[in-house]
Image: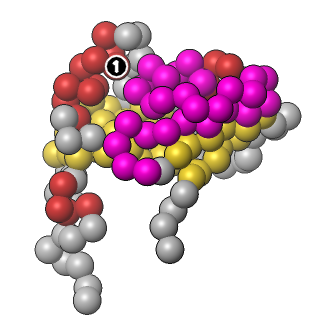
Amino acid sequence: MDLNQVTIPSLDVEKAMAFYKTLGLHLIVDAIPRYVRFECPDGDSTFSIHKVDALPQGDGITLYFEDDNLDNLVSNVREKGISFTQLPEDKSYLWREARLRDPDGNNIILFHAGKNRKNPPWRIN
């Protein structure tokens, strides 16, 4: 089995679309104002956004996007006007990550973990 795509809700799909394009995702379906779908620049996964009248309650959704050149990506995105809640930082779990929120308040973690993403030293067999 392989993960094909993740779909998140949005109050304003057009605004969310612009945000994710700025992050570097490639738009492949444009059905504004109700739906858009992206390809990630690396790998085969896709990501979509659909229009809702109300967002889920609670902490929202957390999305993780890995990039081998995290610091460069963060610098480029910041130059385009996107703000971060945490700039790249090395974590105790062997990931380097930066954090931000999308226009609907969803948490986004841009990170680099390399081999530690799936094979940390504490992985069980």
Q: Quadrant of residue 79?
A: top left
Q: Quadrant of residue 47?
A: top right
Q: Tell me if I can see residue 10 in this picture.
A: no
Mark 1 residue crowding within 10 angstroms, few (<14) / some (14–19) / many (20+) = some
Residue found at the very far bottom of the displayed protein? 125
Q: Is residue 38 left or right of residue 89?
A: right
At horizontal 43% and vertical 51% (from top left) the residue drawn is 44
| Element carrying mark 1 | helix
Q: Which residues are magenta?
A: 17-44
Q: Is residue 20 part of the magenta span, yes or no?
A: yes
Coordinates of residue 117 in the picture (x, y in percent): 26, 61
Query: Image height check: is 41 above or below 116?
Result: above
Query: Image height check: is 76 above or below 116?
Result: above
| Quarter of the picture holding the C terminus | bottom left
At horizontal 30% and vertical 36% (from top left) the residue drawn is 98
At horizontal 75% and vertical 28% (from top left) the residue drawn is 31
The scheme the figure's colours follow is secondary structure
Q: Nearer the viewer, residue 52 or 46?
A: 46
Residue located beneath label 1 in the image = 77
Coordinates of residue 22 in the picture (x, y in percent): 44, 20
Q: Is residue 41 part of the magenta span, yes or no?
A: yes
Q: Tell me if I can see residue 82 in this picture.
A: yes
At horizontal 24% and vertical 20% (from top left) the residue drawn is 75
Instruction: Kindly identify the amino acid type of the residue bearing the numbered disc 1.
Output: Val
Coordinates of residue 25 in the picture (x, y in percent): 45, 31
